[in-house]
Image (spheres, rainbow, N blue to C red):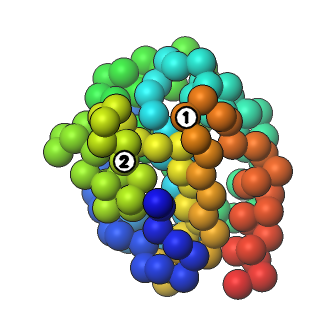
Amino acid sequence: MPLQIGAPAPDFELVDQHGRTVGLAGLRAEKPVVLVFFPLAFSRTCQGELCALRDDLSLFEDAGVHLVGVSVDSKFALRAWAEEEGYEFPLLSDFWPHGEVARAYDAFVEDRGYAARATFVIDEAGVIRAAFAKPAGEPRSIEQYREALELLRAG
């Protein structure tokens, strides 16, 4: 079960698809963060979900939040996928230690070896203000993101 609303968000540093180190503390020092764990790059459901985020990027820009994806894929796979699909938000590699950040968020599927489909909205104080997840093969909806961003605004 993923971490719950009101819990402190575990801090982390991972590399993005360009090899740059990105840390939660640095991101949330600027503005809140929407952390989107997804199982695998180039997979059908994940591609559909991230393309929906790409196509509705203004939702996150208007809300004044960082949108960040996280998977166990290598930075090389994430870069190729981001370039192919036109993702303009960071995709972070939780490749090694394998799934360590997903585990810290209780969002790692041990028997599959990848992150669950889980989303966390983290405020500037590092507190989880909204969280939601879907089972394997079921995409998260943009409406769920809208509702989560409303919780952040209300918080």
Q: CA distance from mark 2 to mark 1?
A: 12 Å
Residue 68 visible: yes
Task: Check residue 108 in the rendering and tell me which mark sits there, or answer none.
Answer: 2
Q: Is residue 71 above or below residue 48?
A: below
Question: Which residue, as the protein is rendered here, is positioned at the far front?
Answer: 111
Q: Position of residue 135 (x, y in %)?
A: 58, 41
Label 1 Cα neighbours within 10 Å, binned few <14 / some 14-19 / many ≥20: few
Task: Name the foreground residue: 4 vs 82.
Answer: 4
* Residue under pointer 1: 136
Q: Is residue 65 above or below residue 88?
A: below
Callout 2, which amino acid? Phe
Under circle 1, the secondary element is: loop
Q: Residues within 10 Å of mark 2 (few under 14, many from 20)?
A: many
Snapshot quadrant of residue 85: top right
Which image quadrant: the C terminus?
bottom right
Name the residue at 67% across, 36% down.
139
Q: Is residue 66 visible?
A: no
Above or below residue 139? Residue 125 is below
Q: Position of residue 49 (x, y in %)?
A: 66, 33
Asked if 144 appears above or below 31 in the picture, the reply is above
How many numbered marks have been drawn onto this rendered protein structure?
A: 2
**Whether label 2 touches label 1, CB < 8 Å:** no
Q: Identify the amino acid type marked 1.
A: Ala
